[in-house]
Amino acid sequence: MTRILLDAMCGGLRAYLRLCGHDAAYAPDRGVEADDAIAALARDEDRVVVTRDRALAAATDGILLRERDPVDQLRELAATGIPLEPTDDPERCGHCNGRLDRVPTDDATPEYAPDPGNEAVWRCRDCEQCFWKGSHHDRMVETLAAVRT
């Protein structure tokens, strides 16, 4: 999958890209907002910059998006060849971009998450947030399907 660095203007894409298995870092989460710092981080971590900033896109050979709406931005990304197929099993935390592990069926989960004995649940290695394929996941998958058609 593609290693991506999203600038502040493209943060609405984070969860969608992570659902597709992309390593999608968000510059403000890293404390980085200035163009030169974003360019340096992208270079150091071998990431493609996704931005609405023409100068930043040109300076980093990044992907320039023109739209403001995240769904329209997803269409633009799809047109550049970035794969937007959700992974069968979630790989990346939608919150922090950490790696996910499947929760064993006999493990406990927080009150907000289903029982892993009844439903597949994944936990982030970094922030420990739990994820499962509920209605939010289904809506995101539907949005991605619509974008690809």
Image (cartoon, rainbow, N blue to C red):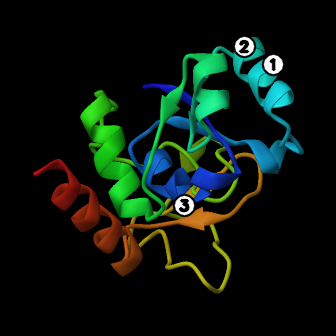
Q: Quadrant of residue 138?
A: bottom left
The reply, left or right, for residue 144 in relation to residue 44 is left
Q: Which residue bears the numbered disc 3?
A: 12
The reply, left or right, for residue 41 in relation to residue 93 is right
First along the sequence among labels 3 and 2: 3
In the rendered structure, are the residues bearing label 3 and label 2 in contact, judged by CB atoms less than 8 Å apart? no
Q: Amino acid at mark 1?
A: Ala
Which residue is located at x 17 percent, y 48 percent? 148
> How crowded is the residue under tag 3: few (<14 C-alpha within 10 Å), some, or many (20+)?
some
Which residue is located at x 54 percent, y 24 percent? 62
Q: As displayed, is residue 38 above or below residue 106?
A: above
In the rendered structure, are the residues bearing label 1 and label 2 in contact, judged by CB atoms less than 8 Å apart? yes
First along the sequence among labels 1 and 3: 3
Q: As displayed, is residue 124 above or below residue 85?
A: below
For the residue labelled by badge 3, is the local secondary structure a helix, a strand or a loop?
helix
Q: Which residue bears the numbered disc 2?
A: 43
In which quadrant is the N terminus drawn? top left
Closest to the observer: 5 or 15?
Answer: 5
Query: Can residue 86 be seen from the camera position used here?
Result: no
Closest to the observer: 127 or 75?
Answer: 75
For the residue labelled by badge 2, is the local secondary structure a helix, a strand or a loop?
helix
Q: Which mark is residue 40?
A: 1
